[in-house]
């Protein structure tokens, strides 16, 4: 049997006093921890330092009660998606709605409408049609951000392509310029 060249150290053997000392240190750390906590965090800036205008916030137009210019026959129009933002930079938000007929089967084409509300009007009204139902598009990846409306349009290369299977994909953007919504020069529509 070979002996270690290092003598046995006293602290390598635990004794009851070691356990008592460790428990006392842990209890003290837990008891004192509230004294060393950081202050509570807030997500809002103080009122004096908030950037931007001091105008009262205006609620965006709701889509309920709006008569959309979409012909659905006996079916009802359904708002599939909506987003709001100040598109014409007048300090009042507009709402952009993706609407289609409530068909139980198939893929009904989408329409994209811009809604606004006059200061004294009770209900919003449609002020622009960005995508008409007759164009047979399905709208995906729809956003309103920084004064622009962007969407991905799934479409058809010919009337012979069935509604279930769009074969073209195009990313588009609309912005308010010179009193009208202008669609960005579309990239060449790509096959899916």
Image: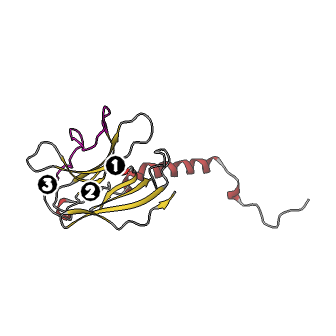
| Mark number, residue 44 | 2
Q: Nearer the viewer, mark 2 or mark 1?
A: 1
- Cβ atoms at labels 3 and 1 below 8 Å apart: no
Q: Residue at x 29, y 40 (%)?
A: 71
Q: What secondary structure predominates along the stretch shown in magenta? A: loop
Q: Residue at x 16, y 61 (%)?
A: 90
Task: Name the N-terminal-most of marks 3 and 1.
Answer: 3
Tell me how far mark 2 sits from mark 1, CA to CA.
46 Å
| Mark number, residue 134 | 1
Q: Secondary structure at mark 3?
A: loop
- Cβ atoms at labels 2 and 1 below 8 Å apart: no
In this rendering, the count of numbered labels is 3
Q: Tell me where the magenta segment starts and ends, as one range.
A: 57-77
- Residue 7: image quadrant is bottom right
- Residue 5: image quadrant is bottom right
- Residue 2: image quadrant is bottom right
Tell me how far mark 3 sits from mark 2, CA to CA.
17 Å
Task: Name the N-terminal-most of marks 2 and 1.
Answer: 2
Q: Secondary structure at mark 1?
A: helix
Local crowd size for mark 3, using a 10 Å CA cut-off: few (<14), some (14–19), many (≥20): few
| Mark number, residue 56 | 3
| Mark number, residue 125 | none
Task: Name the N-terminal-most of marks 3 and 2.
Answer: 2
Q: Residue 106: image x %, image y %?
A: 45, 39
Q: Nearer the viewer, mark 3 or mark 2?
A: 3
Q: Residue 57: image x %, image y %?
A: 17, 53
**Which residue of the protein is positioned furthest toward the top in this rendering?**
74
């Amino acid at each position: 049997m070979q002996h270690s060249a290092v003598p046995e150290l006293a602290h390598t053997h635990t004794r009851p006093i070691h356990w008592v000392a460790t428990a006392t240190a842990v209890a003290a750390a837990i008891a004192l921890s509230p004294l060393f906590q950081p202050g509570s965090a807030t997500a809002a800036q103080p009122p004096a330092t908030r950037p931007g205008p001091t105008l009262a916030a205006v609620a965006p137009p709701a889509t309920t009660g709006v008569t959309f210019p979409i012909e659905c026959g006996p079916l009802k129009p359904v708002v599939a998606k909506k987003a709001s933002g100040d598109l014409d930079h007048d300090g009042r938000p507009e709402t952009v709605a993706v609407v289609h007929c409530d068909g139980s089967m198939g893929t009904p084409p989408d329409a994209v409408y811009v809604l606004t509300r006059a200061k004294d009007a009770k209900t919003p009204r449609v002020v622009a049609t960005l995508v008409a139902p007759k164009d047979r598009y399905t709208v995906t990846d729809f956003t309103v951000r920084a004064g622009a409306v962007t969407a991905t349009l799934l479409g058809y290369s010919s009337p012979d392509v069935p509604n279930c299977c769009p074969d073209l994909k195009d990313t588009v953007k609309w912005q308010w310029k010179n009193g009208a919504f202008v669609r960005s020069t579309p990239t060449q529509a790509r096959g899916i």
